[in-house]
Amino acid sequence: MTNKILALLDGSAYSESVCHHTAWIAGRLNATVDVMHVMGRRESGSAQNLSGALTLGARSALLDELAAADESRARLAQAKGRAILEDAQKIFEADGVGPVVPHLRKGDLLEAVQEVEPDLRAIVIGKRGEGADFAAGHLGSNLERIVRASKVPVFVASRAFKPIGKVLVAYDGSPSAMKAIDRMSKSAVFEGLEITLLHVDNGSGPIGARIDDAVRALGAAGLTATARTVQGEPDEALQAIVASEGFDLLVMGAYGHSRIRNLIIGSTTTAMVQAVKIPVLLYR
């Protein structure tokens, strides 16, 4: 198994939290870390040609000005990207993680991630939240694309870092939920943590045997886990329990049973990533 974590940074308010969460994960897994900042195509050049309706002399002057602006914008984007990666390396060094391999890319974020994904164990990315700046919104808009395409777990960092001790697993018996249990049972990340498996029954019926099997599988791996079932709508119940019971991490399968939901990230998953103030670990 590869043992490398990729941290995706955009320079937003979430970037420091992404670094600290990545360092926490890497420390528990004894994993190496790569950090990546991807400059969008607009940042890295190729301004639109606005000169088509101008006379020849004016057109030439404007083309020169646009080319200079393009070059300046590309230089600034490069400098910003290097600064983001240098700041990240300092954070990882302070957290006792290193060496860290930086990647400054331009183009499409998903394409850049897919190039390195075969060597990855997990991806850490910040989520867009209320009040996030433009850069955070840009990265957040790609979150669904990355979760949908990635074959490795995606850890969605909250705005602020907090050491993780208490984990809530949203368990619906779906293939992705069972995959989450299998991955958790083989991961040093969860050693010594308090794990609760929660099934929210909204009328689909009990899954007692399956959730008990999941608890046993975690217990056989030396992890401490308990199970409980509550009634209600999954997104509302999960949000209320996360808020009231002091959980530090929510673990979910990215997809539920519904065939429609398999076309996108499951609606409960999307709601939880947006609603809760703690990190969310998503398994395909």
Image: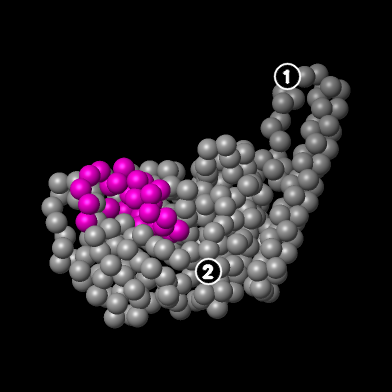
Q: What stretch is highlighted in magenta?
A: 229-256
Q: Residues within 10 Å of mark 2 (few under 14, many from 20)?
A: many
Q: Which residue is at a point 52% across and 52% down the rendered structure image?
A: 158
* Residue 101 screen position, x and y as percent: 67, 69
- Residue 111 shows in the view: no
- Circle 2: residue type: Ile
| Residue under label 1 | 53
| Residue for badge 2 | 25
User: x%, y% of residue 254?
Assistant: 36, 55
Q: Above or below — where is 114 with respect to 269?
A: below
Q: Is residue 91 above or below residue 106?
A: below
- Secondary element at tag 1: loop
Q: Quadrant of residue 183?
A: bottom left
From this viewpoint, is residue 28 visible?
yes
Question: In the displayed structure, does residue 24 sit left or right of residue 154?
Answer: right
Return the disc, 2 or 1, that comes first in the chain's sequence.
2
* Place of residue 171 in the rendered image (x, y in percent of width and height, measured from the top left): 27, 59
CA distance for labels 2 and 1: 56 Å
Q: In which quarter of the image is the C terminus?
A: bottom left
- Which of the 4 quarters of the picture holds residue 23? bottom right
